[in-house]
Amino acid sequence: MAFKWKSVFDVSAIKSDFEVAGLNPNFIPQIWKHVLKNPDCRWDDIPSLPSAAYHLLDSKFKPSTSTVHAAIDSSDLVTTKLLIKLQNGEFVEAVVMRYDTRLGKYDGKPRLGGPRSTLCVSSQVGCKMGCNFCATGSMGFKSNLTSGEILEQLVHASRISAIRNVVFMGMGEPLNNYSAVVDAIRAMTAFPFQLSPKKITLSTVGIIHGINKLQKDMPNLNLAVSLHAPVQEIRCQIMPAARAFPLERLMNALREYQTTSQQKILIEYIMLDAVNDEEQHAHQLGKLLETLQSVVNLIPFNPIGSLSCYSTSDGQKVIKFQKILRGTYNIRTTIRKQMGQDISGACGQLVIKKPDILTDIEDLQEIEQNKIVLL
């Protein structure tokens, strides 16, 4: 079996090896900073490290264990999809989305802000959740990513655009790779990345024990929940994994999370024609969310070829659904602006079919103010 190098950004691995070697872990951010600025560096290019650190890095670590196999820009040049090849030969996708938040209006007034970029990262190769409207689910589960492989997506993307926001909504269910995801997020919010926790969003299908643990470990993180149906029966129909996470228990977990975080929870709701998009479903959803401070993001369904029997909801039905939630239940409700659909880089489209072909992406989502159209 070939020797497997460790990524220098693999948080637990490098900290553990430094401690075993009697080296001060405080040198690690200095190493990361140098690699970010010098991606092709040699370890002995890094100044002022103890001699034992150079030996350790030379023997076990690489500046990057993954490579950008291909990159495709959308026709409007605001979305770039990266096909990233891992050390084990598998592939994941990450997507860079560029915004100018001054465009459009909010509550009838000009919006503040300016240009910024969001990165959608993957946490697994494939996914075991099996949502039947999502192409990633057709892959099945292949492997978890290490924290280094997650962080390397940010490193690769940062060489394309300055990243301000990160969303864990690419391939995989982040809470099924809990330790690596939390390690990666902690590194993202520390030097030299220094992202604000409020600029990082984790999306989950609703893994209750993971949400409860996250509430204690990372209470300031933005949480997005792929709800997609207002009643358990429909959830189980389109999301088989929902059988293990009853809706009542999930809502209790979300209320607890909100009590700790004091932040609104983003509810993701994909609009499937004649499945979950009728007026009765809007009323059911409104009543379900009455005791939760939330923002509902209605997501137009993206076609995934022969992988799905679903159709996209009519635009007028989506608007009516939104009006019910906002007008009757006073729930802030947005309709997602699609980005990257022409390069199969939009919600629900990610599945790696061949190593040399870019095909799709799972769940592009941004916390509500960055990526939606307010009607």
Image (cartoon, rainbow, N blue to C red):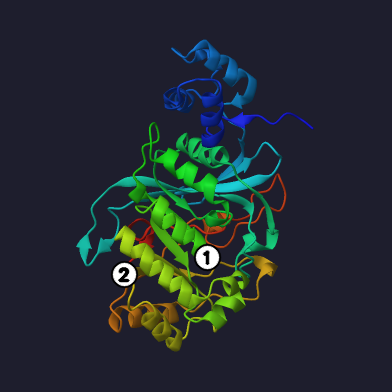
Amino acid carrying label 1: it is Val
- Depth check: give the residue in front, 155 or 106: 155
Q: Residue at x 44, y 55 (%)?
A: 214
The span from disc 1 to disc 2 (Cα, nearest Å) is 18 Å
State left or right for residue 279 relative to residue 302: left
Residue 8 in view (yes/no): no
> Based on the displayed image, in which of its 4 quarters is residue 134 positioned?
bottom right
Q: Does label 1 or label 2 sit earlier along the sequence?
A: 1
- Depth check: give the residue in front, 202 or 24: 24
Query: Where's the C terminus, which quadrant?
Result: bottom left
Secondary structure beneath dot 2 equals loop
Residue 69: image location, x then y, percent: 64, 38
Residue 312: image location, x then y, percent: 54, 75
State left or right for residue 207 relative to residue 84: left
Q: Vertically, is 279 above or below 242?
A: below
Amino acid carrying label 2: it is Gln
Residue 303 in view (yes/no): yes
State left or right for residue 104 relative to residue 275: left
Question: Which residue, given by chain and number where applicable, does mark 2 sit on?
Answer: 293
Secondary structure beneath dot 1 equals loop
Question: Which residue, given by chain and number where applicable, does mark 1 sit on?
Answer: 205
- Depth check: give the residue in front, 302 or 31: 31
Residue 98: image location, x then y, percent: 41, 48
Q: Vertically, is 160 above or below 282?
A: above
- The circle drawn on residue 22 is none
